[in-house]
C-alpha cells in the first residue's frame, strides 16, 4: 500500500536517525575527553553522563530520547489514516506540519535549548498530533 502520508513519517524516521548520529558525534569525543574508556566501561546509561560532560553535549541525546516518545503516537496515527484511505489532503499537510515542528524542536533543543521556545514548539506539535488523532478516530468510526 502506498499513501502520501507515509512520506512525512519516513522523513521523521530519517530525522530521528540523523539525531542518533549527531548524539554519537558529540558524545563520544566528550566521553574520551572526560577519560571514559568505552572498551573497559561496564554498565552505565547515557544519563550517567550528566555532570561529567558539558550540558550541551547531552542536548542532542535528550532530543533523541524525545523523538522516541511522542512520535510513536504519530507513527501509529499515520498508519491508521493510511490503512483507512485518509492518508492524503489535509492529513498529509498536518503530518508535514508535525514533522516540521519536531525538526524545529530538535534544532532548538540541540543547539540553543531555550525551554520557552521548545515548550511552544512542543505544544503546537502536540496540538497538530491531537487533530491527526481525532481524524484517525473519525475514519475508524470511533
Image (cartoon, rainbow, N blue to C red):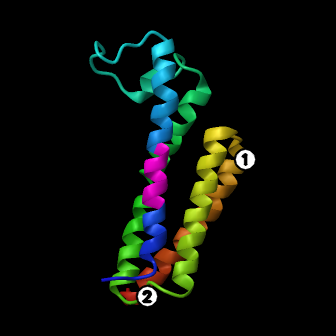
What percent of the width, then of the height, locates residue 45?
37, 27
Residue pictured at 49% horizontal, 22% vertical? 29
Q: Check the picture and name the quadrant holding the N terminus.
A: bottom left
Instruction: Tell whether position 16 is magenta.
Output: yes
Q: Give the range drawn in magenta.
A: 12-19
The circle drawn on residue 11 is none
Question: Is 70 in front, or is 31?
Answer: 31
Label 1 crowding class (10 Å Cα cut-off): few <14, some 14-19, many 20+? Answer: few
Using the image, determine if residue 69 lies above or below residue 99. Answer: above
Using the image, determine if residue 92 lies above or below residue 55. Answer: below
Residue pictured at 60% horizontal, 26% vertical? 55
Q: In the image, is 119 to the left or to the right of 5?
A: right
Q: In the image, is 76 to the left or to the right of 27?
A: left
What percent of the width, then of the height, locates residue 132?
50, 76
Label 2 crowding class (10 Å Cα cut-off): few <14, some 14-19, many 20+? Answer: many
Residue pictured at 33% horizontal, 83% vertical? 83
First reached walking from the N terminus: tag 1 or tag 2:
2
The residue that disc 2 covers is 86
Residue pictured at 45% horizontal, 81% vertical? 4
What percent of the width, then of the height, locates residue 21?
45, 41
Q: What element carries label 1?
A: helix
Task: Please state which of the two labelled residues, at mark 1 or mark 2, is closer to the viewer.
Answer: 2
Q: Check the picture and name the quadrant holding the C terminus.
A: bottom left
Residue reaching furthest to the top: 35
Find the distance from the CA under tag 1 to the CA under tag 2: 34 Å
The residue that disc 1 covers is 116
Amino acid at each position: 500500500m502506498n499513501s502520501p502520508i507515509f512520506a512525512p513519517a519516513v522523513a521523521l524516521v530519517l530525522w530521528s536517525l540523523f539525531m542518533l548520529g549527531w548524539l554519537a558525534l558529540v558524545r563520544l569525543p566528550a566521553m574520551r575527553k572526560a577519560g571514559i574508556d568505552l572498551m573497559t566501561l561496564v554498565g552505565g546509561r547515557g544519563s550517567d553522563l550528566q555532570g561529567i560532560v558539558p550540558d550541551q553535549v547531552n542536548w542532542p541525546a535528550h532530543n533523541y530520547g524525545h523523538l522516541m516518545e511522542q512520535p510513536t503516537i504519530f507513527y501509529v496515527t499515520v498508519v491508521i489514516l493510511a490503512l483507512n484511505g485518509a492518508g492524503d489532503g489535509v492529513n498529509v499537510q498536518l503530518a508535514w506540519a508535525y514533522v516540521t515542528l519536531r525538526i524545529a524542536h530538535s534544532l532548538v533543543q540541540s543547539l540553543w535549548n531555550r525551554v520557552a521556545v521548545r515548550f511552544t514548539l512542543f505544544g503546537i506539535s502536540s496540538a497538530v498530533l491531537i487533530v491527526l488523532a481525532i481524524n484517525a478516530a473519525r475514519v475508524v468510526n470511533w
